[in-house]
Image (cartoon, rainbow, N blue to C red):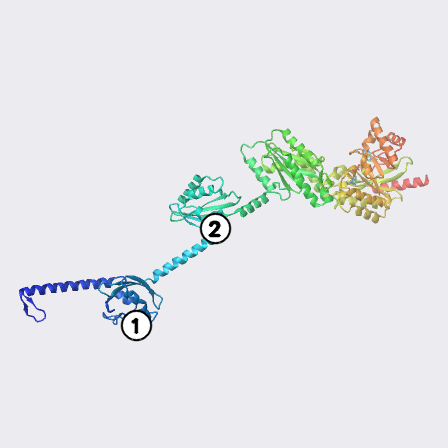
């Protein structure tokens, strides 16, 4: 095929035609190459612009135009670089003037090295520019909008900053391990808490290393590294949090919590909970202990007892219910601080009485204590402990030169015989205690099945007695007292009677001790005093009225006032009133009762010592308080036929004469007895022979007729 010149259409000779053909092929190839290049440039994800040595643009792509928001019509090949800058200033994309921009770019253009720099546009976008010089001169620039990337980096940086701040300011120590079990984060608080340096726990340390390090440094005592590592492993596998307390050698407690992370690593936090633990321990101690004595309290005792009984192999055990005797008197006499001191001392002595480590003594409140004795073999076991306790508490308590005397009564119930559950055991021990109390003081009693009924009866009596005073069920009888030598009636003793609609007439021996225990004796005794004085007011002048007074009344404040007011109301002269007290009053250490009696005696009131010979009968007591009269108990008069008894009676009479104390014989029933008393110089006599206790009206008649008789005869 002939080759035709494209310019003039002439046919090119064969050889020349070959050359034309080659150059056309080359042109085609070049064009194709250009097109491919253009297409590649156009499809780049970055902006691109190429300049020749004269700083004129050869080519740029759409991305470049888009990044700088340039006008495509202006961006023709051949446009000078400075003009592009001016154009960008004109359309408001550039944030600086074209000259300024050019001055920045020029050094990059002039140097033969590739470089990358950034430019911020007026709208805040950040463009990264990679500058590449071209071999024949000129350069190519690649543009990338890195605004988003920068923002993300900034955000990440901020996040890091915050994380660091949080880590540094945490009150907890923190260690973070990655999935390979290597330490990747550790905060300052951790170092501070454990008093270690960063060098002790470099990043990359394993959990095992860390534990071993803490042991080496002597911070942890007793810790099994293998088992700790295994625990962490288990908590990672289970994806569950795990907490444990660590006790440091310096006494602090650290709460370590391990929390697995989703990526396979875990975070361990360290909390100093020393104070919190101490407070918690204090709180639980408080909840379980009596604040005054530090002994376990009722709730803790119950817990222990329930626990002991739940034990299938529960061995017999004994429950002791304890109650102090005369504690109220200590409180009343010395005040509450002394009472508190006494309770603390009692608690100490009780604890010392326990021989087995497992035995427990608890305070249930007031002066009530309870003991649980384990390893109970037989009654003798419990008896020994009971005796020890009675002896220990019977010894005087000395504080600030004051001697306090109390005693203790105990009731004992044994598991399983006396009850299979805590409630029954405690109730039965109480019943036995109640029994011990009613039989006297400083006693222990074992629970017996019949006791319950007796206690019920006694409780019922207390309840009835409580309502008897307002219901006016009490009454006074009067028994005449005679001067033996003259045969004259010199007065009468008031004796209380309870006429209960349900019980009939109840003897004072039956209800006075109960009234003393419940405290009812105070208003009841006051009533007796007023009633007796009121009765005596209508008697012939000069006759004496004797009224029995309980120690409880004397101890209660205001007794003297009550006496004075009874005399004032009745207008009975003080010299005609005789108060009958018992030896226990003189035995009292507090001297407060003696002081009251002395005051009353100074007013002219006479004090008689009743039932002489039945109590401690220590003549020494007579020296402590000068009584006006001694009443020999009727048991001596009854047995006066007995030589020894007669000797005692004679001694008492002789003593009275010696000390100038009137001696009265009680319970004189026969002329023989009266004769004997007369022969021995006994001053007064009282008894059925002289007159039985009689109603107020009857006694008034008797006294009037006798007075008349003595006046006329
Ligand atoms: P007490 O003060 O020693 O009173 C004498 C007791 O002996 C009275 O008993 C009386 O009835 C009884 N008695 C008198 N003569 C004879 C006799 O010849 N033979 C016999 N076997 N007994 C005789 P009562 O009335 O049962 O009083 C018993 C105790 O109760 C009194 O003994 C006294 O300690 C107490 N008591 C009575 N009234 C009161 C009171 O108002 N207040 C106080 N605190 N105690 C009182
Ligand atoms: Mg009496
Ligand atoms: Mg008497």
Examine the image and state in which quarter residue 13 appears: bottom left
Nearer to the camera, 21 or 426: 21
Identify which residue is drawn at 5% across, 64% down: 15
Between 208 and 492, the one lying in front of the other is 208
SS class, disc 1 = helix
Q: Which residue in the protein does label 1 denote?
A: 86
Circle 1 crowding by C-alpha within 10 Å: few under 14, some 14–19, many from 20: some
Q: Secondary structure at mark 2?
A: helix
Q: Is residue 614 left or right of residue 75?
A: right
Percent position of residue 512, x then y:
75, 39
Q: Does residue 235 sit above or below 167 in this rendering?
A: above
View quadrant of ligand 1: top right
**Total labels drawn:** 2
Q: Nearer the viewer, residue 90 or 323?
A: 90
**Location of residue 469 by image quarter:** top right
* Residue at the disc numbered 2: 189
Is residue 473 visible in this depiction of the protein?
no
Left or right side of 628 for 201? left
Instruction: Point out the image quarter for the C terminus.
Output: top right
Labels 2 & 1 near each other (Cβ < 8 A): no
Q: Residue furthest right?
A: 712
């Amino acid at each position: 095929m002939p080759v035709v010149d494209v310019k003039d259409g002439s046919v090119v000779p064969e050889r020349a035609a070959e050359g034309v053909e080659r150059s056309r092929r080359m042109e085609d190839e070049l064009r194709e190459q250009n097109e491919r290049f253009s297409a590649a440039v156009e499809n780049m994800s970055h902006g691109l612009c190429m300049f020749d040595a004269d700083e004129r643009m050869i080519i740029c792509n759409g991305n470049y135009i888009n990044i700088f928001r340039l006008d495509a019509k202006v961006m023709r090949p051949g446009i000078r670089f400075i003009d592009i800058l001016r154009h960008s200033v004109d359309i408001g994309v550039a944030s600086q003037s074209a000259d300024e921009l050019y001055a920045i770019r020029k050094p990059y253009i002039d140097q033969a090295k590739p470089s990358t720099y950034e430019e911020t546009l007026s709208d805040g976008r950040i463009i990264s520019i990679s500058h590449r010089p071209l071999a024949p001169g000129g350069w190519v620039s690649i543009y990338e909008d890195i605004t988003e990337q920068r923002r993300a980096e900034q955000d990440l940086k901020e996040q890091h900053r915050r994380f660091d701040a949080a880590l540094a300011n945490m009150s907890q120590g923190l260690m973070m391990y990655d999935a390979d079990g290597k330490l990747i984060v550790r905060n300052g608080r951790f170092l501070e808490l454990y008093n270690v340096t960063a060098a002790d726990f470099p990043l990359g340390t394993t959990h095992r290393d860390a534990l071993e390090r803490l042991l080496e440094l002597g911070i942890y005592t007793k810790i099994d590294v293998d088992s700790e590592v295994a625990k962490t492993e288990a908590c990672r596998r289970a994806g569950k949090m795990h907490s444990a307390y660590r006790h440091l050698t310096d006494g602090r407690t650290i709460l370590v919590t391990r929390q697995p992370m989703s990526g396979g690593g875990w975070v361990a936090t360290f909390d100093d909970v020393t104070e919190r633990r101490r407070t918690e321990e204090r709180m639980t101690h408080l909840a379980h202990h009596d604040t005054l004595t530090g002994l376990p309290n009722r709730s803790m005792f119950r817990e222990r007892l329930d626990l002991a009984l739940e034990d299938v192999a529960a061995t017999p055990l004994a429950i002791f219910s304890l109650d102090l005797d005369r504690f109220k008197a200590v409180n009343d006499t010395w005040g509450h601080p002394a009472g508190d001191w006494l309770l603390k001392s009692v608690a100490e002595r009780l604890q010392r009485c326990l021989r087995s480590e497992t035995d427990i003594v608890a305070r249930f409140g007031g002066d009530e204590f309870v003991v649980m004795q384990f390893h109970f073999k037989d009654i003798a076991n419990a008896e020994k402990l009971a005796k020890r306790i009675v002896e220990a508490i019977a010894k005087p308590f000395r504080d600030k030169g004051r001697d306090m005397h109390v005693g203790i009564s105990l009731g004992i119930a044994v598991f399983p015989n006396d009850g299979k559950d805590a409630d029954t055991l405690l109730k039965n021990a109480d019943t036995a205690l109640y029994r011990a109390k009613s039989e006297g003081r400083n006693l222990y009693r074992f629970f017996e099945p019949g006791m319950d009924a007796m206690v019920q009866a006694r409780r019922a009596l207390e309840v009835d007695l409580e309502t008897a005073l307002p219901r006016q069920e009490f009454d006074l009888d009067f028994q005449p007292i005679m001067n033996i030598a003259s045969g004259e009636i010199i007065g009468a003793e008031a004796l209380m009677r309870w006429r209960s609609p349900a019980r009939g007439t109840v003897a004072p021996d039956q209800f006075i001790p109960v009234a003393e225990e419940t405290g009812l004796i105070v208003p009841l005794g006051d009533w007796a005093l007023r009633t007796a004085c009121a009765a005596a007011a209508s008697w012939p002048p000069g006759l004496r009225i004797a009224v029995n007074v309980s120690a409880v009344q004397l101890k209660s404040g205001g007794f003297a006032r009550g006496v004075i007011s009874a005399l004032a109301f009745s207008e009975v002269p003080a010299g005609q009133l005789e108060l009958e007290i018992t030896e226990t009053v003189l035995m009292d250490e507090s001297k407060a009762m003696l002081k009251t009696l002395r005051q009353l005696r100074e007013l002219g009131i006479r004090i008689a010592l009743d039932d002489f010979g039945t109590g401690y009968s220590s003549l020494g007591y007579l020296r402590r308080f000068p009584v006006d009269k001694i009443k020999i108990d009727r048991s001596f008069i009854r047995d006066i036929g007995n030589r020894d008894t007669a000797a005692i009676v004679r001694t008492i009479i002789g003593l009275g004469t010696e000390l100038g104390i009137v001696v009265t014989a009680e319970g004189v029933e026969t002329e023989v007895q009266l004769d004997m008393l007369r022969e021995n110089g006994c001053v007064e006599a009282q008894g059925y022979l002289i007159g039985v206790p009689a109603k107020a009206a009857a006694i008034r008649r008797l006294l009037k007729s006798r007075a008349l008789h003595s006046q006329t005869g």
